């Protein structure tokens, strides 16, 4: 392993000249202009911008751009920053193949700096707008950083001075402008820490895993994916990326770790990647495992969609998918297998938060237990006994704030109950989770949460923030409905105005005592009764769902 420094201009030059490249599985440039602006500010002010992680892997020739690339240094961590630096200097990196798209990116990511700002230490950086573009003090940072020789900055200095009122131009002002231009140009000369690893591919996963533990943002699974790509040239570009992109378009944007651990979990019964035999990544065993995994993921996603899980964003933990995939792969073809029972375990595991945070050891234990199980029932029992949640849910689970990270499972459950009861949007009448034009599942659907007793009504009654945001006060509408139409009105009034039927209220699991448009019943003085009775109803329906799934 080598640790050294490279200047910003050197990093960009290597990206342009193909001395460094990015693996084919890397994402496209996803930074927004604000992130590029902040990077420029950090470089100017001498703030740390993180180290870059390079992998010297001459054995692998499947770069993102083309086969047979000469570059053997991969940017494993630093792709976004490298591309941002190239945009700041106005030099197109080798892997950005579309010149027209690059020119559009140059316009979108243009960053301006106010040379005439009052504070010499904190020059102002900003995105272009018509006012700044007419102000001689605001210039494009790219005009400065694009200069190879600092001596050429005199042209920019003259341009700034020529646009200033004559009374403002003097020797001191010229010195200030020259000094600031030189300091900005020095961004090109900023040193960036580089960590370069050169090992046999068998050791790469462990090396990067240990670097990750030391604080580097690279994930072990990303490197293992690269290891699989080394052993299976073309697999990422021809098979993995098309499959991943197809799922992403349908609302299932899964992290690389989910795919990698699904493959190893299904084939060798391990989620801890260091325990996977090195020869597994060879072409024949790996390709066979991928073929099975691809089919399993498709089948499980389809099953989950039938229950209303139309997007990965609905899930409290995506790690919980891995044991579900392994269960399905191992037992789906035997008569004893019941996906509803597996789904029940899946829900309870998310309720328990079993795989949230750093949970690789826990994942590994459960995957191993599934592989060692005598049959499907035995497997479910083994992994279920590790859960720390009861068999039944209580109303108290719905008397917590909906907008807290710890309430993600309860939100999911409320949504699933509404989906299962064919609830429809109270304004546009579309069924929750269905397309607005066709009677089909709306893949990628995300709930729009609505307060049954609107916040404005509760604020006027001096109810606390905790009270008004209770899960039992929440329901789901479609993304097309403007919730503010309802939030301005008391419940009885919006029920009458939008013609919300009693059946529609029932399908949203509104307690029977409130299935009415009577203004007195919906008076805010009855809010506590509503919260308690709806929490009881939600718990009752959730337990009924659990019982149905467990049969």
Image (cartoon, helix red, strand yellow):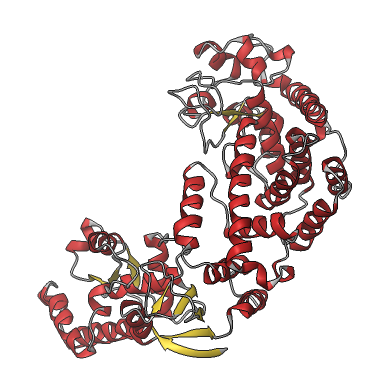
Whether residue 470 is visible to the viewer of this picture, yes or no, is no
Location of residue 356 with respect to 522 vertically, above or below: below
Q: Is residue 275 left or right of residue 294?
A: right
Q: Is residue 358 left or right of residue 149?
A: right
Residue at x 74% of width, y 33% of height: 340
Residue at x 65% of width, y 27% of height: 461
Query: x and y percent of residue 254 in the render?
Result: 57, 52
Name the residue nearer the viewer: 13 or 142: 13
Location of residue 282 with respect to 433 vertically, above or below: below
Q: Is residue 241 left or right of residue 468?
A: left
Q: Quadrant of the N terminus?
A: bottom right
Query: x and y percent of residue 225 in the render?
Result: 57, 66
Q: Is residue 443 left or right of residue 504?
A: left
Q: Quadrant of the C terminus?
A: top right
Whether residue 231 is visible to the viewer of this picture, yes or no, is yes
Name the residue nearer the viewer: 257 or 349: 257
Q: Residue lying farthest front? A: 284
Query: x and y percent of residue 386 in the render?
Result: 87, 50
Name the residue nearer the viewer: 225 or 448: 225
Query: x and y percent of residue 329 in the render?
Result: 70, 47
Count of numbered circles on the image: 0
- Image-quadrant location for residue 538: top right
Residue at x 27% of width, y 59% of height: 101
């Amino acid at each position: 392993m080598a640790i050294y420094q490279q200047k910003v201009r050197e990093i960009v030059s290597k990206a342009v000249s193909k001395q460094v490249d990015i693996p084919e599985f890397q994402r496209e440039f996803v930074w927004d202009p604000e992130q590029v602006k902040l990077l420029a500010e950090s470089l100017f002010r001498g703030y740390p911008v993180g180290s870059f992680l390079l992998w010297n892997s001459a054995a692998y020739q499947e770069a993102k751009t083309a086969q047979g690339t000469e570059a053997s240094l991969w940017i494993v961590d630093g792709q976004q920053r490298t591309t941002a630096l190239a945009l700041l200097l106005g030099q197109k990196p080798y892997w950005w193949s579309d010149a027209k798209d690059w020119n559009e990116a140059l316009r979108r990511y243009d960053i301006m700096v106010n040379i005439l700002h009052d504070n010499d230490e904190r020059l102002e950086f900003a995105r272009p707008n018509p006012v700044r573009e007419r102000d001689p003090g605001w210039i494009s940072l790219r005009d400065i950083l694009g200069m190879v020789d600092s001596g050429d900055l005199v042209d920019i200095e003259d341009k700034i001075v020529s646009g200033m009122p004559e009374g403002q131009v003097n020797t001191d002002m010229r010195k200030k402008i020259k000094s600031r231009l030189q300091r900005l140009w020095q961004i090109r000369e900023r040193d960036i820490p580089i960590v370069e690893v050169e090992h046999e591919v068998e050791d790469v996963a462990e090396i990067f895993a240990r670097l990750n533990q030391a604080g580097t943002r690279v994930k072990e699974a990303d490197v293992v994916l690269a290891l699989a790509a080394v052993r299976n040239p073309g697999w990422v570009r021809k098979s993995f990326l098309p499959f991943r992109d197809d799922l992403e378009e349908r609302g299932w944007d899964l992290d690389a770790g989910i795919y990698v651990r699904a493959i190893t979990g299904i084939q060798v019964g391990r989620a801890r990647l260091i325990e996977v035999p090195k020869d597994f990544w060879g072409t024949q065993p790996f390709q066979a495992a991928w073929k099975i995994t691809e089919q399993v993921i498709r089948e499980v996603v389809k099953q989950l969609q039938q229950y209303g899980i139309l997007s990965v964003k609905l899930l409290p933990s995506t790690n919980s998918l891995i044991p579900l995939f392994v269960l399905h792969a191992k037992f789906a073809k035997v008569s004893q297998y019941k996906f509803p029972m597996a789904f029940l375990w899946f829900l309870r595991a998310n309720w328990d938060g079993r795989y949230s945070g750093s949970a690789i050891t826990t994942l590994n234990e459960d995957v191993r237990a599934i592989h060692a199980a005598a049959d499907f029932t035995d497997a479910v029992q083994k992994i279920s006994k590790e859960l720390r949640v009861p068999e039944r849910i209580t109303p108290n689970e719905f008397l917590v704030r909906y907008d807290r990270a710890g309430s993600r499972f309860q939100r999911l459950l409320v949504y699933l109950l509404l989906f299962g009861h064919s609830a429809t949007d109270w304004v546009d009448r579309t069924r929750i989770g269905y397309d607005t034009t066709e009677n089909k599942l709306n893949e990628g659907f995300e709930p729009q949460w609505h307060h049954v007793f609107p916040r404005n009504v509760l604020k006027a009654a001096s109810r606390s923030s905790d009270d008004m945001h209770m899960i039992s006060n929440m329901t789901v509408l479609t993304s097309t409905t403007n919730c503010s139409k309802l939030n301005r009105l008391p419940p009885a009034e919006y029920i009458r105005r939008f013609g919300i039927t009693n059946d529609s209220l029932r399908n949203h699991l509104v307690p029977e005592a409130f299935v009415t448009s009577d203004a007195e019943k919906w008076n805010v003085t009855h809010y506590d009764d509503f919260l308690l009775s709806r929490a009881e109803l939600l718990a009752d329906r959730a337990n009924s769902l659990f019982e149905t799934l467990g049969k």
